[in-house]
């Protein structure tokens, strides 16, 4: 396989994607990397999760290993800041961040985001500064006149999959990061448009999440089923779009990691959304492997 840290790298975060969503969804392009793994994330919302990821601490597999080529590893990356351990890692990270590590090896560092923590127009947002080339496709931070419950297309990062593939192919080697907001509330994509039932459930979820209160009279089973179905279709749309990217760059056989930054609670523990510790928030899906071969 050659040196793993000399390969192109693609790191994708499926924002807010639950593990049970990944189990239900049909994901033939992600399955090219291998089976979905059950993992535990270090963060319960976007900023702390990505802060950990960008230093190499992606979600930890629960009772499983990463199969990279013919080898099994405990972790894909291991930061030099970590305490000594006998655990195996596919790549030992020598820089302060993954971006520093790969930049020092001659990679072009490209990023793309869709949730507002990646909006470079916000002065407090430092995550985009880690990249040589960062593209933000999401809406600016909402105002009081903007509804959060809406259909989405161009603001979804993976709508621009072909453009991102071209950016990779224009380099000798690249590290490409993509934050994918299709699986983030409101879970709408070109495959999952709003109807009255979905809109009502989403309005209720936003209100319950914003209140941060324990609520035993929250979403009904029917409303939860609607929301889960929306997120399943949002992941299936993301998989379709990743197929465009994967098809364009497969000949370069990149190292690919796709995971959720955190999940989402729909009342299982009496709370809603994310930003708090609950197994539905901290347990996330993860795929990893070297991309090669044809889609299933």
Image: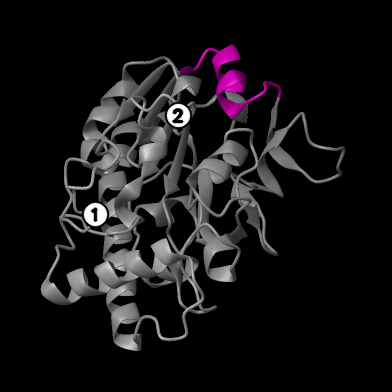
Task: Tell me where the magenta segment starts and ends, as one range.
Answer: 94-108
In the rendered view, tell whether residue 205 sits above or below residue 131: below
- Res. 154 image quadrant: top left
Disc 1 and disc 2: Cα gap in Å?
Answer: 21 Å
Residue annotated with mark 2: 125
Q: Residue sitting at 35 percent across and 55 percent down? A: 184
Which image quarter is the N terminus in? top right
Q: Residue 178: x and y, percent? A: 39, 37
- Res. 155 image quadrant: top left
- Res. 122 image quadrant: top left
In the rendered view, tell whether residue 14 sits above or below residue 272: above
Mark on residue 148? 1
In the rendered view, tell whether residue 55 sits above or below residue 190: above
Q: Residue 275: x and y, percent? A: 52, 57
Q: Earlier in the sequence, mark 1 or mark 2?
A: 2
Q: Nearer the viewer, residue 211 or 141?
A: 211
Q: Nearer the viewer, residue 67 or 226?
A: 226
Q: Is residue 185 left or right of residue 276?
A: left
Secondary structure, mark 2, is loop
């Amino acid at each position: 396989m050659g040196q793993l840290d000399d390969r192109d790298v693609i790191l994708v975060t499926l924002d807010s994607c639950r593990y049970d969503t990944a189990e239900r969804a049909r994901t033939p392009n992600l399955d090219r990397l291998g089976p979905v793994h059950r993992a535990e994330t270090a963060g319960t919302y976007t900023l702390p999760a990505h802060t950990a990821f960008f230093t190499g601490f992606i979600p930890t597999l629960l009772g499983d290993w990463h199969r990279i080529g013919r080898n099994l590893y405990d972790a894909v990356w291991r930061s030099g800041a970590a305490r000594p351990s006998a655990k195996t890692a596919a790549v030992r990270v020598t820089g302060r961040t993954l971006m520093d590590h790969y930049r020092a090896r001659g990679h072009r560092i490209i990023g793309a985001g869709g949730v507002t923590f990646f909006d470079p127009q916000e002065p407090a947002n430092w995550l985009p500064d880690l990249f040589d080339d960062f593209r933000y496709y999401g809406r600016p931070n909402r105002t009081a006149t903007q509804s959060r419950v809406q259909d989405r297309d161009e603001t979804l990062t993976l709508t621009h999959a072909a453009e991102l593939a071209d950016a990779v192919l224009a380099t000798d080697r690249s590290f490409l990061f993509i934050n994918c907001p299709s699986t983030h509330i409101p879970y709408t994509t070109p495959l999952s448009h709003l109807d009255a039932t979905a809109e009502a459930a989403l309005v209720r979820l936003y209100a319950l999440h914003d209140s941060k209160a324990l609520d035993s009279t929250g979403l009904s089973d029917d409303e939860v089923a609607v929301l889960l179905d929306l997120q399943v279709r949002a992941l299936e749309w993301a998989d379709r779009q990743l197929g465009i990217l994967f098809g364009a760059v497969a000949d370069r056989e990149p190292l690919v990691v796709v995971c959720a930054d955190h999940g989402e609670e729909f009342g299982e523990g009496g709370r809603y959304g994310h930003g708090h510790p609950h197994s539905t928030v901290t347990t996330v899906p993860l795929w990893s492997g070297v991309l090669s071969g044809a889609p299933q």
